Amino acid sequence: MPNIPPATKEELLAAMRRFDAEFRSLPRWVRWPTRADRFALLHDGKRYPVKFIISLATSYSVSGFSGGNEANTYVGKRGLTVITL
């Protein structure tokens, strides 16, 4: 499986702002997290879907990389906090 394209912490934070502005109110995300979701980014008291934020920041498909350890390590190395749901 290919590596996730690079993104800076600032690009990931921008993706979180974009998520809040454009996606959080959509039906798919209003119901998030679901029972199937295991992890979330935690920033400024809000939870974010790890893979989707990476995808927004990198324009890389969420199906192109795994969640869990791969995605969590990616954001953790950039100083972001992942929590277990």
Image (tube, rainbow, N blue to C red):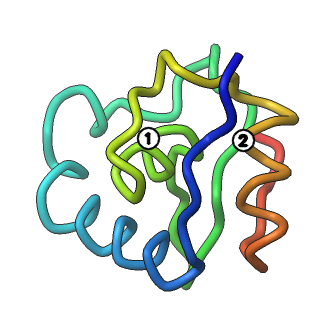
Three-letter code, disc 2: Ala
Three-letter amino acid code of the residue under disc 1: Phe
Q: Which mark is residue 69?
A: none
The first of marks 1 and 2 along the sequence is 1
Question: In front: 6, or 25?
Answer: 6
Picture coordinates of residue 27 (x, y %)? Answer: 17, 29
Residue drawn at point x = 74 percent, y = 74 percent: 78
| Residue at the spot 41% in from the left edge and 52% down from the top edge | 58
In this rendering, would 27 be left or right of 51?
left
State the residue lying farthest toward the front: 2
User: Badge 1 is on which residue?
Assistant: 52
Which quadrant holds the N terminus? top right
Residue on which the image places disc 2: 71
Along the horizontal axis of the image, is 9 left or right of 76? Answer: left
Q: Quadrant of residue 17?
A: bottom left
Instruction: Determine crowd level at label 1: few under 14, some 14-19, many 20+ residues with C-alpha closer than 10 A.
Output: some
**Residue at the spot x=62%, y=24% of the render?**
65
Give whichever of 73, 19 is nearer the camera: 73
Camera-side residue: 8 or 13?
Answer: 8
Mark 1 to mark 2 CA distance (whole Å) = 10 Å
Q: Report which quarter residue 38 is drawn in.
A: top right
Please say if 76 is above or below 9. above
Q: At x 55% / y 59%, what residue is drawn?
A: 47
